[in-house]
Each structure stands twice: as C-alpha cells, then as structure tokens.
C-alpha cells in the first residue's frame, strides 16, 4: 500500500500535470469506486470544475476544485492515478474512473483489486483523513512524540501504524524507522525510553524525507502519476530483507508477525 512518500510523490506529479485544467467529462465504469454525498451526482458535479490544487493528507491525495469542493483519493492496495496525454485513446488497464479535461488531457483512476476510492466531498464538508498528526509538519515535535507514547501498552510498531496517532506511516516506514532508531518492534510503546523516543522521532522524519527524495518505494506495483517507479527500495535497511545481513551489525534480518503484519528487524541491534 502506498504510504506517505509514495502518495506525496504522486500528489506532486499530479499537481504539475493537472492544476489549472478544467474537467470536461467524467466516465465511471465501477460506481462503488466513485463516492459522493447523498443526492449528489459524482459525474454531473465534477463536470466544469477547475482543478485548483493537489495536495496530500496522510495517505490521501486531496484535489481542491474551483467551487471549493474537494476530491479525495485513497489508493489503498493497488489504486493508481495515471495522467494521459492527448491522443492516448485507450484507458489505462483496470481504469474505473476517467476524467477528461478540456485540453484533451486525461486522468485515469485504475485499481486491479478495487479497494481504492475517489470521494467527492460536499462544499465545506469537514474531512480530515484519519486525524493523526502529519509527521513532516511543525506540529510533530520531538516533545509531542515523546508524550504521545506515555501510557501506551501497544507494541511500538503497532502504535506507529495507527493512523489516528501519526498519519501516513505504514508498514515499510515503521520497520525502517524502528531499525534506524535501534528499537525492537514489539517493545510496548510506554517502555521505550525517552532518548529512544527522540531517536525514533528523528528516524521517522529522516526515513520519510529520504524516501520522498527517492520518489518513494516500489515494492508490489507502486508507480507515480507518470507511471514511473520509485527508488527507495534500493535503500531499505530491513523491510523485505529476510536473511540478509544487517547493515549495522551484520546479523541476519528476521521476519516476525506483529498485529498480522510482516515485520522485518534485526535481533542484534534493535532492543
Ligand atoms: Zn543489526
């Protein structure tokens, strides 16, 4: 599933490609993917709207429209947003929604497994992803993170994956940040020492920023809005590296299961 760096990369590419364009036509071939408020037509309401902004909140892409309405996109497992140049007639494979712009460019929302959603919010409708703090925002201070873990008995990795706490961190970056900070993934959050919490705070930001710089991690089938793969899979320290030597201590990376998620870590240097 795309996490913060991948969604940020897609949003930036999309902003370059579609901001300023006006929607001429909307085609929906799988209605469950296109969500709108009761009584509002997704297709009719979007027609004539101008794309003003493209941003990201947590793992959601947020498209701001001229009327003040917003369109949120959650890619979930296999969703893709692909920009198409004029003259490309054939929709991208597994396209369920296609926006055609007045300048004949197109935007396809494709999803093999159909868990993704494109949701039209009502004008002024309150919406805030899952509510967690943005880890790259000024609100995510070291001290705020240190106190977030107080009294939390849940394993630290499970805590990191909960979008109500921190928004946009998923399995890849939770594993990587815990390795970078030298913390065992199943350690109860409240038992992580204050210095280790500060290290982890820095590691979360560091790993996310480095991945954005590399345009995200392509495991499974992530590609950005231009259909390009990311490069951070070449810089992973633990995720998906079962049996390979730890870059820090040389012991083999292990894989365990925590809260039903594969968890890669090093028994040698994560305490
Ligand atoms: Zn190690």
Image: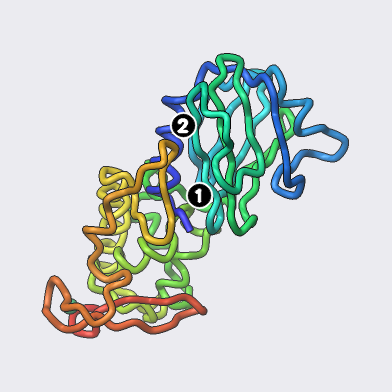
Question: In screen coordinates, is 129 left or right of 206?
Answer: right
Q: Which residue is mark 1?
A: 59
217 or 195: nearer the viewer: 217
**Measured Cα–Cα span from mark 1 to mark 2:** 15 Å
State yes or no: discs 1 and 2 in contact (Cβ < 8 Å): no
Residue at x-position 39% and y-position 55%: 144
Q: Which residue is mark 2?
A: 14
163 or 12: nearer the viewer: 12
Q: Quadrant of residue 148?
A: bottom left
Residue 118: horizontal and vertical position, in percent? 65, 42
Taking the view exactly as shown, the residue that stands out farthest to the left is: 249
Q: Which mark is residue 232?
A: none
Residue 146: horizontal and vertical position, in percent? 36, 62
**Local crowd size for mark 2, using a 10 Å CA cut-off: few (<14), some (14–19), many (≥20):** many
Residue 62: horizontal and vertical position, in percent? 56, 36
Q: Quadrant of the C terminus?
A: bottom left
Residue at x-position 23% and y-position 67%: 237
Residue 33: horizontal and vertical position, in percent? 70, 47
Q: Quadrant of residue 215?
A: top left
Q: Secondary structure at mark 2?
A: helix
Taking the view exactly as shown, the residue that stands out farthest to the right is: 39
């Amino acid at each position: 599933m795309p996490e913060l760096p991948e969604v940020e990369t897609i949003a930036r590419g999309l902003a370059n490609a579609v901001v300023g364009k006006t929607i001429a036509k909307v085609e929906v071939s799988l209605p469950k993917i296109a969500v709108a408020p009761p009584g509002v037509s997704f297709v009719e309401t979007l027609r004539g709207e101008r794309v003003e902004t493209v941003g990201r909140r947590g793992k959601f892409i947020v498209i701001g429209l001229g009327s003040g309405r917003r369109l949120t996109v959650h890619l979930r497992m296999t969703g893709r947003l692909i920009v198409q140049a004029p003259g490309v007639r054939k929709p991208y494979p597994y396209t369920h929604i296609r926006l055609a712009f007045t300048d004949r460019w197109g935007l396809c929302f494709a999803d093999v497994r159909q868990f993704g959603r494109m949701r039209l919010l009502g004008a002024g409708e309150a919406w805030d992803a899952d509510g967690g703090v943005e880890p790259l925002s000024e609100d995510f201070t070291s001290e705020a993170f240190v106190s977030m873990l107080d009294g939390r008995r849940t394993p630290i990795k499970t805590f990191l994956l909960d979008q109500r706490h921190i928004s946009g961190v998923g399995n890849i970056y939770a594993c990587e940040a815990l390795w970078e900070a030298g913390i065992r993934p199943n350690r109860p959050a409240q038992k992580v020492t204050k210095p280790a919490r500060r290290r982890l705070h820095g590691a979360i930001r560091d790993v996310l920023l480095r991945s954005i710089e590399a345009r995200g991690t392509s495991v499974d089938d992530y590609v950005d809005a231009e259909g390009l793969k990311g490069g951070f899979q070449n810089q992973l320290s633990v995720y998906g590296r079962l049996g390979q030597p730890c870059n820090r201590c040389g012991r083999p990376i292990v894989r365990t299961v925590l809260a039903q998620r594969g968890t890669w870590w090093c028994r040698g240097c994560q305490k």
